[in-house]
Amino acid sequence: MKKRLFIKTYGCQMNVYDSARIAELLTPLGYEAATGPEGADLVILNTCHIRDKAVEKMFSELGTIRRLKHAQERHGGRMVVAVGGCVAQAEGAEILERAPFVDIVFGPQAYHRLPEMVARAATERVLDTSFPAEPKFDYLPETSATPGVSAFLAVQEGCDKFCTFCVVPYTRGAEYSRPAAEIIAEARRLADSGAREITLLGQNVNAYHGLSPKGGVWGLGELIGALAGIPGLARLRYTTSHPKDVDDALIAAHRDIAELMPYLHLPVQSGSDRVLAAMNRRHTADQYRRTVERLRRARPDIALSSDFIVGFPGESEADFRATTDLVRDIGFAQAFSFKYSPRPGTPAANAADQIPEPVKADRLAILQALLHEQQQAFNQACVGEVLPVLFEKPGRHPGQLVGRSPYLQSIHAEAPAERIGDIVPLTIRAALPNSLAGAIAPQSPSLDGVAA
Ligand code: SF4
């Protein structure tokens, strides 16, 4: 008999990827996807620790699940409740203690054992937050779900950098790179099932150093080179990168591999060397500038995106000005910026010189205004240009499709549904606040087969 599985996913693309793999893992046990938790046989919260107040928000969500579970029990049913992801890893037994109706708590490195945990949950409550000696990828089934036009593929996991604000090294564990042959095989399956674009995922993706098919070690540049030849695959991207791990081979890949899109999310966090050192980022602001220069020499049209933290402990007005100076020097096409908020268990959380909230809020407003201005300028500069757009899905209005430019901008245009999966030249007509509007360019039926 079919059982209903509801997974709620928080946070990053890696969690989205993990949730898809969890669903595949549970399919042989008879679970099929439900659109909501009501009446589900198994509810999984795949949590994220990066969000502000992540733990409180998770317990609040669990309150809703508890009411649904008890309602189900009153009607003679049973709902198994599982909490996974980075909050589960960090909080572990605390979740079982505070939420007695939760049946399973599992960490991101343990989810390949979920079928066994679900079976055990019939008679006991299960906690599995160990970092197994064996890589979980060896125990996951081959990807089988239809991926859509744009797919994710995890190539690396964990992080050894230990930035002082970040929980990832504690929740995801040490860096692990999947062997290249395994990644190439998964990419081929995705392409065979219709994926035209693959985004390679990793917490520190350009630290990738996986076993090559011939027995040596490949970095991310070499891996991208091997993936670029896969038939049907028109576009490659990767995220999230660390500036210190941008090596010569990766820069050469941006120069030489047409399938590698000219867009890079390269978090810098701060423009102040003092703050970068306190964050343990292992590079200076000028080293970041030089890396960007090299990338731009290799691929002049590359668009840059970044992450910023304002109000890190000890950040002075001069430090903050160094950040806005760096933003002006680089010119970002897009960026994510946040106020520093302490993550329990990380070194910066205990720093004495925390910045008052109003100061953080003022600095964030200034930075976001600057970043917004740069994003608008970048989008506005595209108006009148013809960009190759990979149509991904129907738009909000009938007869409309939505796709992505090489620079990851979301673009909508009138086009028939059968063009989903095609790369089509669009003339950009307008830059809207969060997207672009385009129209199919005349006399250019398709750019398919041509790397965009
Ligand atoms: S490199 Fe990224 S994932 Fe690793 S500790 Fe720093 S911020 Fe966290």
Image (tube, helix red, strand yellow):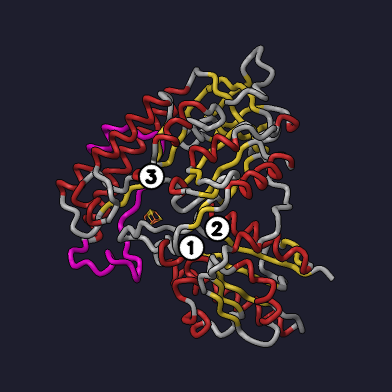
First in residue order: circle 1 vs circle 3: 1
Q: Residue drawn 49% across and 74% down?
A: 59
Disc 1: CA contacts within 10 A as few (<14), some (14-19) or many (>=20): many
Q: Residue drawn 60% across and 37% down?
A: 227
Q: Quadrant of residue 368?
A: top left
- The boundaries of the magenta stretch are 325-354
Mark linked to residue 245: 3
Query: Of residues 93 and 413, which is closer to you in this image?
Result: 93
Q: Secondary structure at mark 3?
A: helix
Q: Where does label 1 land, which residue? A: 48
Give the image location of residue 38, x and y in percent: 69, 70
User: Ligand 1 falls in which quarter?
Assistant: bottom left
Give the image location of residue 299, x and y in percent: 43, 26
First in residue order: circle 3 vs circle 2: 2
Q: Gap in Å between the C-alphas at discs 3 and 2?
A: 23 Å
Q: Residue drawn 57% across and 69% down?
A: 110
Amino acid tagged 1: Cys
First in residue order: circle 1 vs circle 2: 2
Q: Does residue 345 belong to the magenta stretch?
A: yes
Mark 1 and mark 2 in contact? Answer it, CB < 8 Å. yes
Q: Residue drawn 25% across and 60% down?
A: 357
Q: Gap in Å between the C-alphas at discs 1 and 2?
A: 8 Å
Q: Where does label 2 land, which residue? A: 15
Q: Gap in Å between the C-alphas at discs 1 and 3?
A: 24 Å
Amino acid tagged 2: Asn
Q: Locate the C terminus and report the quarter of the image it occupies.
A: top right
Query: Of residues 428 and 315, which is closer to you in this image?
Result: 315
Q: Does residue 74 belong to the magenta stretch?
A: no
